[in-house]
Image: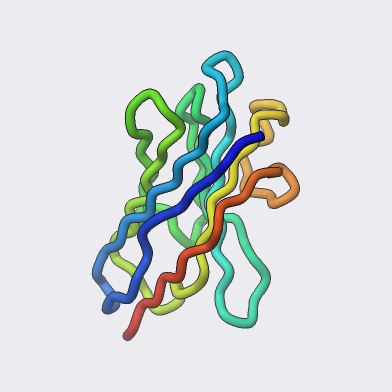
Amino acid sequence: QAQVGLSGGGSVQAGESLRLTCTANNYVRSRPPCLGWFRQAPGQARKGIATIHIGTGATYYDSSVKDRFTMTQDGAEVTVHLQMDGLKPEDTGMYYCATDARRPREACEEAREDNFGFWGQGVQVTVSA
């Protein structure tokens, strides 16, 4: 069973940057997972904002973060950084990462919660105006 860890987060001013790092273990090279990022703003439902397929490197970004957030893989393990630049107050929320290798590769083309079975703990990101 995969274990997912998430680090980073914090409080910044609008326009500044933060980096989150998600790691997952218990995956094998022959069956790379999809890794997704989700955000839950105060009083709102959790929403998918980005995905990356660990095997192909294919990425998906929600329009709310496209061109500001960038995912990069780190090394041979399942480690993905989410670089968040040009942060806005509306980016405030609890951030989560999740993985799953059981879905078809095409399922990684969108950030749907029900495509992911293994979740890390959330981290808070607060952006002040």
Determine which quarter of the picture holds residue 90: bottom left
Q: Position of residue 18 (x, y in %)?
A: 30, 62
In front of the other: 48 or 68:
48
Q: Position of residue 66 (x, y in %)?
A: 43, 53
Q: Quadrant of the C terminus?
A: bottom left
Q: Residue shown at 57%/41% (left/top)?
A: 3
In front of the other: 112 or 5:
5
Determine which quarter of the picture holds residue 106: top right
Q: Residue shown at 37%/34% (left/top)?
A: 73
Q: Quadrant of the N terminus?
A: top right
Q: Relative to residue 70, is residue 90 drawn left or right?
A: right
Determine which quarter of the picture holds residue 30: top right
78 w.r.t. 113: above or below: above
The outermost residue toward the bottom is: 129
The outermost residue toward the top is: 30
Q: Position of residue 24 (x, y in %)?
A: 51, 38
Q: Residue shown at 55%/58% (left/top)?
A: 121
31 w.r.t. 86: above or below: above
